[in-house]
Amino acid sequence: MTKKKMPSKGINRTLTNAINKLVVEVMKDEPEAKEGETPKPPKYSLTDKMKVLDRALKHEAIRLKVEDEGEGGFFKRKGADENGTE
């Protein structure tokens, strides 16, 4: 029998980079108009921009949750030692 390679715990860096690139591209969407020309409408609607931001925020929340689970952060308090006393 061969062992299946278990995926490493955490967020895929390729996915993170793709989301970051998408956010930058969508938010930078302001077509330049030369002097005397009518400005072109934006390529992305406000709804599209909000969808991208929502996905980026969800991705960040998942990333933080994965980091906390790795450290047992749910049960730890700031300033508390191993016995739970401060």
Image: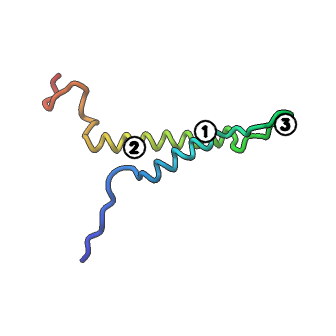
The quarter of the displayed image where residue 33 is located: top right
Q: Nearer the viewer, mark 1 or mark 3?
A: 3
Image-based side of 16 in relation to 42, left or right: left
Q: Residue at x 70, y 37 (%)?
A: 30
Q: Residue at x 67, y 38 (%)?
A: 46
Residue 60 image offset from top left, x and y in percent: 44, 40
Q: Residue at x 29, y 43 (%)?
A: 69
Residue 42 image offset from top left, x and y in percent: 73, 40
In contact (CB < 8 Å): disc 1 and disc 3: no
Residue at numbered disc 1: 50
Residue at numbered disc 2: 63
Image-based side of 5 in relation to 61, left or right: left
Relative to 40, does residue 84 appear above or below in the rendering? above
Sequence-first tag of 2 and 3: 3
Image-based side of 36 in relation to 56, left or right: right
Q: Residues within 10 Å of mark 3 (few under 14, many from 20)?
A: few
Sequence-first tag of 1 and 3: 3
Name, please, the residue furthest toward the top.
Answer: 86
Q: Amino acid at mark 1?
A: Met
The quarter of the displayed image where residue 76 is located: top left
Report, in whole angstroms, how far the alpha carbon at label 1 lies from the one at label 3.
26 Å
Report, in whole angstroms, how far the alpha carbon at label 2 lies from the one at label 3.
43 Å
Residue 41 image offset from top left, x and y in percent: 77, 40
Residue at numbered disc 3: 38
Q: Amino acid at mark 2?
A: Arg
Front residue of 42 and 79 = 42
